[in-house]
Image (cartoon, rainbow, N blue to C red):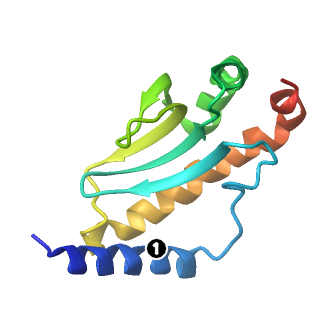
Amino acid sequence: MFSKVEAQQIRKEFWIAFGKSFPRKWILYNTKIKDFSFKFNADPKKAEVSLDIEMIDEVFRNAYFEKMWSLESILEEELGEIFKDEFYLLENGKVISRFWITKANVSIYDKNTWQEIFEFFVEKMEGFERVFYEYEDFIKDV
């Protein structure tokens, strides 16, 4: 396997390569909704694109989760099978709500799968963004 420094360098190269391959501004944290953000993730076994609803106030987090859940069929039309978890537990112990799409059998440490990950990221994040922009007023009305 890789040393911690080597793994860190590969991850850095991965994100730089992604940015150079697909140079565009993603919505990510710029949703204008506090603690409501879109994220890319790649690890040794999979790649994911997610919508993380991280409000500490459970009432607001639940309200945004319910709004997004009501759009589930539209999300699935855009993204394919989508996973959801109202009480998703992060590694740091924090509970959030999450909607996500996963691509298995790819690895941030295997440069041969990078292009496949990049294309997955672009396709799925563009789908998330289309739904968000189309239903932005509805989503924000909490």
How many numbered marks appear?
Answer: 1
Q: Which residue lies furthest to the left in this view?
A: 1
Q: In which quarter of the image is residue 72?
A: top right
Identified at 39% across, 62% down, the residue is 116
The x and y percentages for residue 140 are 84, 32
Q: Which residue is drawn at 53% across and 33% down?
A: 98
State whether residue 131 is above or below residue 113. Answer: above
Task: Report x, y in % for residue 51.
Answer: 59, 40
Q: In this view, does 8 lie above or below 137?
A: below
Q: Which amino acid does label 1 sit on?
A: Trp
Residue assigned mark 1: 15
**Residue 106 image position (x, y, % from top left):** 29, 56
Q: Position of residue 94 (x, y in %)?
A: 45, 35
Image point (84%, 37%), residue name: 136
| Residue 127, placed above or below residue 22 | above
Image quadrant of residue 11?
bottom left
Q: In which quarter of the image is the C terminus?
A: top right
Q: Badge 1: few (under 14), some or many (20 or more) residues near its Cα, within 10 Å?
A: some
Viewer-closest of 119 and 88:
88
Q: Nearer the viewer, residue 89 or 110?
A: 89
Left or right of residue 48: residue 109: left
Q: In this view, does 70 lie to the left or right of 76?
A: right
Considering the image in quadrants, where does the N terminus appear? bottom left
- Residue at x 24% of width, y 73% of height: 7
Q: Element type at marker 1?
A: helix
